[in-house]
Image: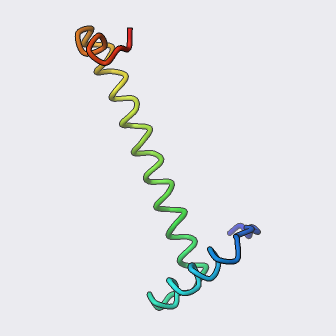
Amino acid sequence: MTTITVQLPDEVHAQLTAAAEGDGVAVNVAVVQAVQDWIHASGQRARERARMREVLAEDPLLRELLGDD
């Protein structure tokens, strides 16, 4: 396991602490979950961008309508 240091604005830290306490989890657990969610969302966005590029490459009319030529 890796330990990192993260600098958060005081207000974000307060919100994080309150949210973690509200969910009954440690701040570390909340941060790990947030990072995992971000990684998942980032991968999803990359797949969606790749699919959009494929669709645009296959459809010249759509590219024209979108002004992508």
Answer above or below: position of 69 versus 24: above
**Residue placed most toward the observer, 8 or 29:** 8
Which image quadrant: the N terminus? bottom right
Q: How is the image coloured?
A: rainbow
Left or right: 28 in relation to 56: right
Answer above or below: position of 52 versus 45: above
Query: Residue drawn at (45%, 45%), measured in percent from left and top?
Result: 43
Query: Residue drawn at (44%, 87%), measured in percent from left and top?
Result: 23
User: x, y percentage for residue 14?
Assistant: 62, 82
Query: Residue drawn at (52%, 90%), measured in percent from left and top?
Result: 21
Answer above or below: position of 10 versus 49: below
Left or right: 49 in relation to 64: right
Task: State which quadrant residue 17 falls in.
Answer: bottom right
Query: Residue drawn at (26%, 15%), measured in percent from left and top?
Result: 65
User: x, y percentage for residue 15?
Assistant: 56, 80
Answer above or below: position of 56 versus 69: below
**Residue placed most toward the observer, 63 or 34:** 63
Task: State which quadrant residue 12 falls in.
Answer: bottom right
User: x, y percentage for residue 33?
Assistant: 50, 70
Left or right: 3 in relation to 22: right
Which image quadrant: the C terminus? top left
User: x, y percentage for residue 20?
Assistant: 52, 84
| Number of numbered discs overlaid on the protein picture | 0
